[in-house]
Amino acid sequence: MEGMFRDLWRIALKEYPKLSFYNTIKSEMSYEAYLDLPNHSDKRCVAKLRASNHRFNCETRRYLPSNKSPSYMHDKEYMVWRKSCKTCCAEEAKDLRQLPFHTPIIEDEQHILVTCPKYHHLRLDLRDEVKSLVVAWNTTELKQLFESSNIRHFARFVKRIFDERFPKEEKTGSKDQDHPNSTTSFTSDGQLSQSPIL
């Protein structure tokens, strides 16, 4: 029974492209050190990062805003630009998407952890060994970030990124820029309660 469950788990991982980051850091079903973190907020942020269950643009902006026709889903350039980092891709640079050699910088897990200048000051506070694992960005080093010797320090770094990117005042029901006629609401554990438009 356990073997069958493990097989189903591996198949599911391959079928969902949304889990690409999770696949990078998890290859075997086993207990994870982050589950023993004493701080619930740190633990929650790490869990969200691992499962790509966060509000960075690579996830929330993969869906169309309500004022756009479904035909926009076939405009690959438009959909890619929607997921770009607003710190690194200025609004006025949208015109550059017509150029064949220009690729926007996507706000994904790698970008926020490794390269986005918005969080540079947070990277400077990392312990040297954790910083080297983050910057290396390969499967072996990424897995080490989630080991018991590093997870506490790494979790604090992830939590600080989440706090800076999504200030608490936004969680009081602010207007969603993609859905100007609706109010974004959040559940008690910080989940976005708005249904995505597919």
Image (spheres, rainbow, N blue to C red):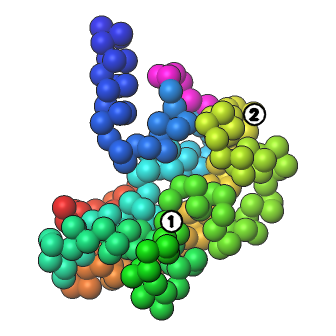
Q: What residue type is labelled 2?
A: Ser
Say left or right for 19 vs 26: left
What numbered label is drawn on residue 150? none
Residue 82 in percent (x, y) is at 37, 73
Among the two numbered marks 1 and 2 on one chain, the one whose residue lies closer to the N terminus? 1
Q: Is residue 40 above or below residue 23?
A: below
Q: Which corner quadrant holds the N terminus? A: top left
Q: What stretch is highlighted in magenta?
A: 28-33
Say left or right for 37 vs 166: right
What numbered label is drawn on residue 107? 1
Separation (CA) of disc 1 from disc 2: 28 Å
Residue 158: quadrant of the picture? bottom right
Residue nearest the viewer, comparing 129 with 104 = 104
Residue 193 in percent (x, y) is at 28, 62
Q: Name the residue under label 2.
A: 149
Residue ID at (32%, 75%): 78
Residue ID at (61%, 36%): 139
Residue ID at (59%, 62%): 112
Q: Which amino acid does label 1 sit on?
A: Glu
Residue ID at (26%, 85%): 180
Q: Is residue 182 above or below residue 2?
A: below
- Residue farthest to the front, as pictured: 100
Q: Main secondary structure of the magenta part?
A: loop
Residue 95 in percent (x, y) is at 42, 88
